[in-house]
């Protein structure tokens, strides 16, 4: 399989629903059996959206109150369409989830649907700090290049 421009694996046309379901539909969407109350659907969506499970469960209860059986049937469909999350040591546990770089932690992490970024003032402050560090490095290079020590080292390197 090839990956598209966003990093997701592209599905072949001959690939069946069962294999896509087993891989989490290519976006890492699974039922979470370890944090499940009934089938793990709410916990799976909470993991995928990177929100607490109680928020998703509260939303499902609200939908159940306001829509009646529609939310119940939606939960059943989710239970049928979402495969259980593969274990850490299972042979089928492939890493098909697109990754993104987290600048604060300086490491890659799975892409999530809801990514709460810093406030604009915080982002501007971080950008100013990075620019000030870059400016101080450039100033240090300029001081070295215009110094007599640089000229002396250059003359010694010619020997």
Image (spheres, rainbow, N blue to C red):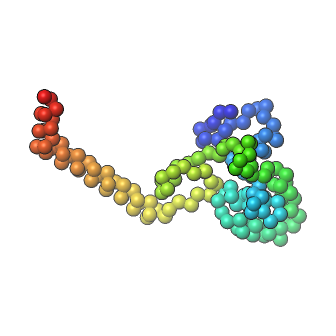
Q: Residue furthest top?
A: 159
Q: Is residue 94 visible?
A: yes
x%, y% of residue 52?
67, 65
Decide which of 123, 133 is in the foreground and name it.
133
Q: Is residue 25 visible?
A: no
Decide which of 109, 87 is in the foreground and name it.
87
Q: Quadrant of residue 33?
A: bottom right
Q: Is residue 135 left or right of residue 98?
A: left
Q: Is residue 96 above or below residue 159?
A: below
Image point 62% across, 58% down: which residue? 114
Q: Is residue 102 above or below residue 95?
A: below
Image point 75% across, 69% down: which residue? 58
Decide which of 63, 105 is in the foreground and name it.
105
Q: Is residue 149 above or below residue 56?
A: above
The quarter of the picture where the C terminus appears is top left
Image point 46% across, 62% down: which residue? 120
Q: Quadrant of residue 42?
A: bottom right
The quarter of the picture where the N terminus appears is top right
């Amino acid at each position: 399989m090839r990956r598209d421009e966003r990093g997701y694996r592209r599905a072949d046309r001959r690939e069946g629903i069962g294999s896509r379901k087993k891989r989490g539909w290519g976006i890492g969407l699974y039922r979470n059996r370890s944090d499940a109350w009934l089938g793990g659907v709410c916990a799976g969506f909470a993991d995928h959206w990177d929100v607490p499970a109680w928020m998703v469960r509260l939303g499902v209860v609200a939908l159940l109150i306001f829509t009646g059986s529609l939310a119940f049937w939606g939960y059943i469909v989710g239970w049928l369409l979402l495969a259980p999350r593969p274990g850490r040591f299972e042979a089928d546990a492939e890493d098909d989830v697109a990754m993104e770089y987290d600048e604060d932690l300086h490491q890659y992490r799975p892409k999530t649907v809801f990514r709460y970024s810093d406030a604009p003032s915080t982002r501007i402050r971080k950008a100013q700090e990075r620019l000030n560090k870059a400016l101080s490095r450039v100033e240090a290079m300029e001081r070295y290049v215009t110094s007599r020590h640089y000229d002396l080292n250059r003359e010694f390197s010619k020997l």
